[in-house]
Image: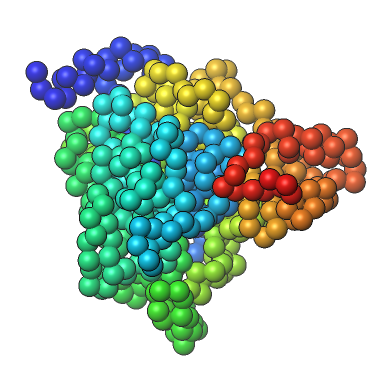
């Protein structure tokens, strides 16, 4: 019996709406700091992303999908665990000491964490992650290979991803020294494509938390040159950023980076077709939060990176947390579908569980959106609420219930600080605060804020925690 036939037999009885001959491959691509308006199918006007757009043309576009957070680590923790940021283990970007002086790790996932990668691994999937992890290092419990991944290549630490020309990367715990002239995204793409090729005869989960367009606006000159001509007024703009050094004309670099990312999506699609596995492969494209203004000279206003939304990275307004979300699965999803189903990162884990035909872990916050993917809207459960908390800038939190959204700022200093209230159906840009008109809704949200979360010793949020 061949390897592929073995897995077809093993999984043949799994229910995916109707019986499927084999479990689907899953490719999850998560851009870093790409805004809702940074993809042309979501309204970007100054450059185009045709390969990413094709996921919508031949699949499904979500218009109301949310990241787990407004910054990197908690967004990834939410995705991996199926919990919102009031329950997930990692609720902010924090470092912890390493085994030797000068070494640090991002705060790691606990050793007993049930991750979506672990679930897939336990059900026969090959699992690989290529890019920025941000949830621990190879010396602690957050090692991706201790959290369900067979293979990891990239940055363990977020801080190391502030340049796209690093001095080193890691492969399964082994440090790989580089010359400082190698574009890291090229390596992430190469390793991911190789992983897909090596596992074409078995189900696989390829997680691509890539770095574009995070931090330094850097890209190979072949991509940047045409955009220098379109933005010549910024040729004398030189910005020094973090470990990246000097970056000239970062305005031209940004669209070039997005096109480089789009090419990666195109190469993945092409490879799946070449290998004959495109039909039963799920491709997901999204971003970890809204657009970041602190990159090396990035100007979110030039490109209207938040689209019609208010806010950017580190905000809990829509522009900080509502993200592009595109899904292509030819075997199950009709082409060109647009859905306004309200969903979030923490829904991915239970969706995977329903695809596998297994029960999700108890107590998670996510709801499977598989019925939406299959067009079975009547069977789609709807969230009672969505919740976010952000531990920087004095503490911020937000709740969405139906079309209504509440935001509270400066919570750490004053848990009774004013609550802003918006009706997203009528005011997607969150310009009209309705708190004074609907005091009863404000009080309801105030009560819910404390009911939907649990305190974390690693991430104290309210006074006394």
Above or below, 282 relative to 98 = above
Furthest residue toward bottom:
236
Name the residue at 60% across, 34% down.
Answer: 342
The spot of residue 458 in percent (x, y) is 56, 47
Q: Quadrant of the N terminus?
A: top left
Residue at image coords 21%, 29%: 202
Image position, residue 389 (x, y; %): 64, 46
Visual colour scheme: rainbow
Question: What residue lies at 32% left-to-right and 69% top-to-bottom?
Answer: 165
Is there any visible trace of residue 81 in the rendered image? Answer: yes
Q: In the figure, 449 relative to 363: above or below?
A: below
On the image, the x and y values in percent for residue 290 come to 56, 55
Extreme residue in the left direction: 1
Q: Residue at x 55, y 43 (%)?
A: 68
Q: Nearer the viewer, residue 188 or 58?
A: 188
Whether residue 259 appears in this view of the structure is no
Indicate left or right for 276 with 138 as reference.
Answer: left
The quarter of the picture where residue 277 lies is top left
Q: Looking at the image, which is closer to me, 372 or 202?
A: 202
């Amino acid at each position: 019996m061949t390897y592929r036939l073995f897995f077809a037999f093993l999984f043949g009885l799994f229910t995916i709406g109707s019986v499927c001959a084999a479990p689907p491959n899953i490719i999850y691509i998560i851009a870093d700091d790409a805004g809702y308006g940074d993809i042309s199918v979501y309204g970007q006007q100054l450059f185009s992303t045709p390969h990413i757009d094709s996921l919508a043309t031949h699949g499904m576009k979500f218009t109301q999908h949310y990241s787990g957070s407004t910054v990197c680590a908690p967004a990834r923790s939410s995705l991996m665990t199926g919990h919102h940021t009031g329950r997930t283990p990692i609720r902010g970007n924090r470092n912890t000491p390493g085994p030797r002086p000068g070494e640090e790790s991002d705060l790691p996932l606990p050793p007993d964490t049930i991750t979506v990668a672990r679930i897939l691994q336990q059900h026969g999937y090959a699992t690989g992650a290529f890019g920025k992890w941000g949830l621990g290092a190879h010396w602690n419990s957050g090692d991706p290979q201790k959290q369900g991944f067979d293979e990891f290549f990239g940055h363990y630490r977020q801080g190391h991803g502030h340049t796209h020309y690093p001095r080193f990367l890691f492969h399964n715990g082994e440090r790989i020294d580089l010359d400082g002239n190698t574009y890291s995204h090229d390596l992430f793409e190469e390793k991911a494509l190789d992983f897909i090729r090596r596992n074409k005869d078995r189900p696989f989960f390829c997680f691509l938390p890539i770095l574009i367009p995070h931090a330094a606006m850097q890209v190979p000159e072949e991509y940047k040159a045409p955009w220098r001509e379109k933005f010549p007024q910024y040729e004398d703009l030189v910005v020094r950023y973090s470990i990246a050094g000097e970056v000239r004309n970062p305005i031209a670099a940004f669209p070039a980076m997005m096109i480089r990312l789009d090419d990666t999506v195109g190469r993945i699609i092409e490879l799946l077709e070449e290998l004959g596995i495109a039909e039963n492969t799920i491709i997901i494209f999204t971003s970890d939060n809204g657009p970041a203004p602190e990159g090396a000279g990035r100007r979110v206003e030039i490109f209207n990176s938040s689209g019609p939304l208010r806010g950017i990275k580190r905000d809990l307004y829509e522009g900080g947390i509502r993200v592009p979300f595109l899904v292509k699965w030819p075997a199950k999803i009709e082409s060109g579908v647009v859905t306004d189903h309200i969903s979030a990162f923490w829904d991915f884990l239970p969706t995977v569980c329903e695809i596998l035909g297994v029960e999700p872990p108890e107590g998670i916050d996510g709801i499977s959106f598989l019925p939406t993917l299959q067009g079975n809207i009547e069977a789609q459960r709807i969230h009672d609420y969505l919740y976010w908390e952000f531990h920087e800038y004095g503490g911020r939190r937000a709740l969405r219930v139906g079309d209504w959204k509440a935001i509270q700022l400066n919570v750490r200093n004053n848990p009774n600080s004013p609550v802003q209230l918006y009706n997203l159906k009528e005011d997607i840009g969150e310009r009209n605060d309705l708190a004074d008109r609907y005091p009863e809704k404000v009080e309801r949200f105030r009560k819910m804020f404390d009911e939907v979360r649990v305190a974390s010793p690693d991430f104290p949020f309210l006074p006394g925690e």
